[in-house]
Amino acid sequence: MPTPRFIQISTLTSYPAALLNRDDSGLAKRIRFGGAVRTRVSSQCLKRHWRMAEDRFALSEVDPSLTMSIRSRETFNREVLPLVISKGVEEALAVAVLQGLGKQLYEGKEKDADSAKKADAKKEDKHPLARKEVVVLGRTEVEYLAGQAVEIAKELGPGLPAALKERDKAIKDCLDKQYKRTSLGENLKALVAGAGLDAAMFGRFVSGDPEARVDSAVHVAHALTVHAEAAETDYFTAVDDLLTASEGGSGHLGAAELTSGLYYVYVVVDVPQLVSNLTGKEANDWLTADRTLAARTVKHLIHLMATVSPGAKLGATAPYDHAALVLAEAGERQPRTLANAFMNPVPLSGDVFAATVRALSGYLEGMDGMYGREETRWLACRLPVDGLGGFTGAERRTLPQLADAVEAAILQGA
């Protein structure tokens, strides 16, 4: 088959007695699906744990030339400002110029100045460069913005008006002149993978300049249990070693929810978009671009999906497990989730995992019967799947072999 446009990855992973992802009240996240309430893990939670993982398949290990993004409300004052000052720019001027650059990116050129000042006033005692939203910038972009600020400060020169209103106008005029032909966002977009590898994968939203946005290339669904929720309240005590011995009782009494479940996780990789985000080429030209980094990134992602566990209460529940099934599909058709295999919840009796595998295979077989099968499939599973029609034709592999096969498919075609 030709080089696949989409890689679809499905996994099944079980967690006993855990609290993987909490809502604002401290309870497990939930959603109703197919007539039953399921335990849920948000896509944001999954992506953060994959981003932060530290092992040989960490995203930071994909390529030494690629950096990860910096995600903070204080990126401008903690990362960009020190670089500008180190180049000899006086701090007050550096702050003023960076405020202007920040408004170009996150508030747009047409934002009302009075509204901006009111928003700044609400920051109270925060640094004047701190923003109310989390800013996602790559290390390359941080260095670029610092360089731009130094250039603009030099152009403004020592004759910058002392009065705040006149100074702001001078900086604005200088910025408008600097970005008359190309916006600041377009310049950032021209930096190859400048937003960082994780932003190239999961995207980046920028509120002011749409040219600085990065379209997501890796689409992550919320994880759901294949069966109805299984939860109970855990009452616990903390013993006071000194008082309990003499007076009885405990030092603390508390309660926390615990859940158990077999979770289905689904991810789609838009290969042309990933290649474009990593190389700077247009997505339409992805087949002529170097796909090495994109292929290696997907290989690492498969390992992370299979082995990295999301989880709160790590010390109390040790919520670590590896996926017991990983199915990868490579093809050109529009993707489709396999979550509907579990619209009728798997019964919580007998061998839940085996019943889940049969349900998944049966659903896949039905979809193939309706639409035909065009995707190339690779399967890693701890159970034999002989006789399960939906997996007929899927190449059985170990997980490392499966990840290698997907990497090769992106590089050379499956």
Image (cartoon, helix red, strand yellow):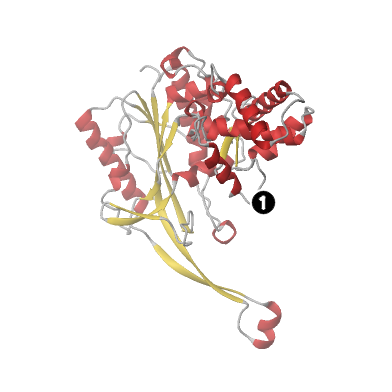
Is residue 67 visible in the rendered image? The answer is no
Q: Position of residue 367 (x, y in %)?
A: 24, 35
Count of labels in the image: 1
Residue located at (34% from left, 23% from top): 332
Q: In this view of the protein, which residue sits in the foreground, 349 or 216?
A: 216
Q: Nearer the viewer, residue 96 or 54?
A: 96
Which part of the image, by quadrant, shows the C terminus? top left
Mark 1 neighbour class, 10 Å CA radius: few under 14, some 14 to 19, many 20 or more:
few
Query: What's the amino acid at mark 1?
Result: Asp
* Up/down of 285 relative to 43, above or below: above
Rendered-image quadrant of the N terminus: top left
Q: Residue at x 33, y 58 (%)?
A: 348
Position of residue 223 relative to residue 154, above or below, is: below
- Asked whether, in this view, residue 246 is left or right of residue 364, the answer is right
Query: Could you tell me residue 87's position as x and y percent?
Result: 78, 27
Determine whether, in the image, residue 230 is placed left or right of residue 197.
Answer: left
Extreme residue toward the bottom, this view: 247
Which residue, given by chain and number where applicable, does mark 1 sit on? Answer: 125
For the point 77% across and 32% down, the residue is 90
Which residue in the rendered view is the most extreme toward the top?
288
Whole-percent x and y of residue 150?
A: 71, 25
In the figure, is residue 283 to the left or right of 155?
A: left
Helix, strand or loop at label 1? It is loop
Q: Position of residue 295 (x, y in %)?
A: 50, 24
Position of residue 332 relative to residue 344, above or below, is above
Camera-nearest residue between 109 and 133: 109
Can see residue 19?
yes
Residue occupying image coordinates x 30% and y 32%: 392
